[in-house]
Amino acid sequence: MSERRKIEFDYSGVDTDRMRVNVGPQHPSTHGVLRLEVELEGEIVTEVVPHIGYLHRCFEKHAEAMTYPQVIPYIDRMDYISSMNNEWPYVIAIEEMCGIKVPEKVEYIRVICAELNRIANHQIAVATFGLDAGAFTPFLYLFRDREWILNLFERISGGRLLYNYFCVGGVRGDVYPTFKEDCLDIVRQVRATNKEIMDLLIYNHIFVERTANIGILPVDVAINYGCSGPVLRGSGFPYDLRRSEPYSIYDRFDFDVQVGKGEVGTVGDCWDRNIVRMREMEESCKIIEQAVAQMPDTGDVFEAIPKKIRVPKGEIYRAAENPKGELGFYIVSDGGQKPFRVRPRATSFINLSVLPEISKGYMLADLILILGSIDIVLGEVDR
Amino acid sequence: MGLLDRLDNPYNFGGIILGTLEDLLNWGRSKSDWYLHFGLACCAIEFMAANASHFDFMRFGTIPRASPRQADFMIVSGTVTLKMAERIVRLYEQMADPKYVLSMGSCANCGGPYWEHGYHVLKGVDRIIPVDVYIPGCPPRPEAFLEGMILLQSKINKQEIFKKRKRLEEEMKNMNQ
Amino acid sequence: MTQQEIYNILKEKFGDEIIEFSHELPSDPYIVANRSKIDEICLFLRDEENLNFDYLVILSGMDYIEKLGVVYHLYSIKHKHRLTIKVFLSKDDPHIPTVEKIWRSADWHEREAWDMYGIIFDGHHNLIRILCPYDWEGFPLRKDYKTPEEYHGIKVPY
Ligand code: SF4
C-alpha cells in the first residue's frame, strides 16, 4: 500500500466522532442506484457496506417464464451499456446445446459488433470516471464518438441501446453495403479521440495525482473475490477469455491482452484499471480492422437459424468476455419450450463485492473514484 | 402565446411590451427549469446521451441539481422497483412547489417489459407520485425525450398561477365553513 | 485434467461423500456431492497442488421442484480446467455449510441463494437478504412462489 495516499491519522488528541453516512441510492456519482453505507472517521473511510437490489428486475424469474428467443431482450437489459456482448454467451450456449454451427459471415459480424460495443462501453466508463474526478470535457468528446457507434448499430439492428440483434444460429439482419467502410471510419475516429483523451485526461497531472495509488487491488485478492475483466487485468493478471479459452473465432486475431503495470503508481490502482480500458479500445480497433479485412462479402446470415428451437434436456455453462469481465450463462433445460433456469454470472455483481475491501483507509472523495474505476452497471448487479 | 410574440403586435410602441405578469412568470419558469435526475436504468443512459454533445439537453435552459430542494422538475428514467419506491416519494415530497414529473420510458410509465412477472417492479411510477409528461419507448430516443421536454414547457406556459391561487383560496374557504 | 480424473481423485479422498459423476452430451459433466462435507471438499479442491481451483465462477441456488440444490462452478486459472459440483438439499431442511471463507466471492452468492431460494448456509457471517428488501416475504425464485398482492401499501400486480 502506498504511503502517500493511505492516511493513518492519530485521532487521539482530536475530538472526532465516527459517523455513518449514506451515499445513495439516488446520488449523482454512484453510477446508478447503489446505496453505500459508509462509516467515516473524520474524512477517512473505515467501513463500507454496499446495499444493492434497488434495480432488482427479476431477470431470472422472467427467463423461466419466456421461451428461449424471448429471453434475449431481457438479457439486453441486464448490462444495458454493452448489450451486444451480453447476448453472445447466451446464444453460444444454446447453439452448443442444439449443435448449431453458425455461418462464417455471422461470426465476423458478431465479432465486429461485440468489439464496437466494447469500445462504446469503455467510452462511457472512461467518460464517467473522468466526471467523477471532475473532468467534464472528456465526457463530451467520448459521447460524441459513441454516437457514431450507436448510429451504426441502429442501421443494422434498429435499436440505439438495446439491440436484440444476435439470435440463436445467426443475427437478425444482414449488414448494409457500406458497413465495412463505416467500421473503419469509426476506428479512425476512435483512435484520433483516444489520442486526445490520453493527453487531456489520462496523463493529466491532476488526474494522475487524483487516481494513482488509490484503491489498490492486489492480484490474489482479486482472484479470490472472483473479479474479472479490466478489474483483474488492472491488477496485472492477464486473464482474458478471448485469449485463454478462445470462443467463436477469436483465435484468428492478433491482439494483446492489456494489463496494469503501475506506470504512475502501484499496480492495481484506479489509474491502472482505467488505462487498461483505454488500451483495450485500441486492441478492439485492431480486431475490427482484421475482422473487416477477413470478413466474407457473400453468405447467407439466416441459413443456420432454426425454425423452432428445441433444446435437449441438459445443462450448460458458457462464458464470453464482456467489456466488464467474464459474463456467463448457466442454462438448465428440461427439454421444453422454456428454459428451466437461466442463471447469469453477473460480472458487475462480483466485481462490486470487492469494493469494501479496497476502499478502507482512503478519503470519502476517493471512494467515489474507486467505485467509478470498477465500472459497474446496476442493471447487471441487481438483474 | 409566449411573451416575446407580443413584440410584433399592435400594442408595441416605443419598445414597451404589454403582457400579463402570468406570461412573464411562466416564460421565466419554463425557460429555466432545473431538474433532479432520478436515473434508474437503461433509460438513464439514453438520458445521458441526450445530455451530451449531440443532443445538448441544456439548451432548453435546464440545469441539473443534485438536491431536490432546488429542483423544479424530476425526471424518472428507468425501472422503479418496490425497494426504490419509498425513496422516490420522499425526494418528490422534498421538492418545492410548483413541481413537475417527467416519466421517461415504458418502465416508468407502466412497468414496461417487466409488467407481468416482475414481482419486485412497480408497475408505473404514477402509482406513487403524479406524473405530468409520459415519454413512451424502451428506451425513448433522445429526440423523443426532447419532445417530452417541449411538452412540459408548453404545459408550464399554459398554467394560470393566479387563478389557481384564487381557486385554492376559495376551496379553503369552503372547507373552513 | 478432465473432470473424470478430478472425480477419481475426489472419490479416493472423500469416498461416500461424492455420489456420482454424470457426463451425457450435450450437457456439461458434473459431480454430485453430499452436503455435509462440501466445505472440506472445496478447501481440498482449492489447495491441492494439481487441482488448484482458485476461482469460484458462480454459485447458484436451484429449485428442482421436489428438492433444492446448490451448484458450484469452479475454474482453475493456472491449469485452465473447470469443474461443476452439484449438491441436492431437501426442502424441509435446506442447510449446507458455507464456503465463503474459501472463496470470498461466495459471500454475496450465498446471500443471493438465501434471498431467492431460502437455502441456509451454516456459518455464513451475515446471511441476510441482498436483492429484495430486508422485510420481503417468501423466496421469489422458488417455482411455487406467488407474487404478493401488496407491498407497503403499494399494489404489486399490474
Ligand atoms: S423502458 Fe426499457 S430501456 Fe427504459 S428502463 Fe425500462 S427496460 Fe430499460
Image: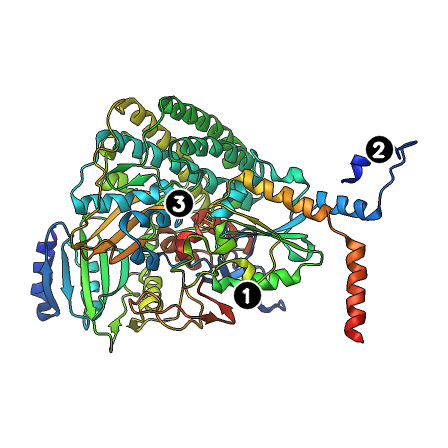
**CA–CA distance in space, label 1 to label 3:** 42 Å
For mark 1, does the 10 Å Cα neighbourhood hold few (<14), some (14 to 19), or many (20 or more) residues?
A: some
Q: Position of residue B48 (x, y in %)?
A: 54, 43
- Residue A191 is labelled as none
Q: Secondary structure at mark 1?
A: helix
Would you identify the image quadrant in which residue A11 lies? bottom right
Horizontally, residue A276 falls left or right of residue A253, namely right
Residue position marked by numbered label 1 in the rendering: B86
For mark 3, does the 10 Å Cα neighbourhood hold few (<14), some (14 to 19), or many (20 or more) residues?
A: many
Residue position marked by numbered label 2 in the rendering: B9
Q: Secondary structure at mark 3?
A: loop
- Nearer to us: label 2 or label 3: 2
Q: Is residue B127 visible?
A: yes
Q: Residue at x 21, y 43 (%)?
A: A95
Chain bearing mark 2: B
Residue position marked by numbered label 3 in the rendering: A267
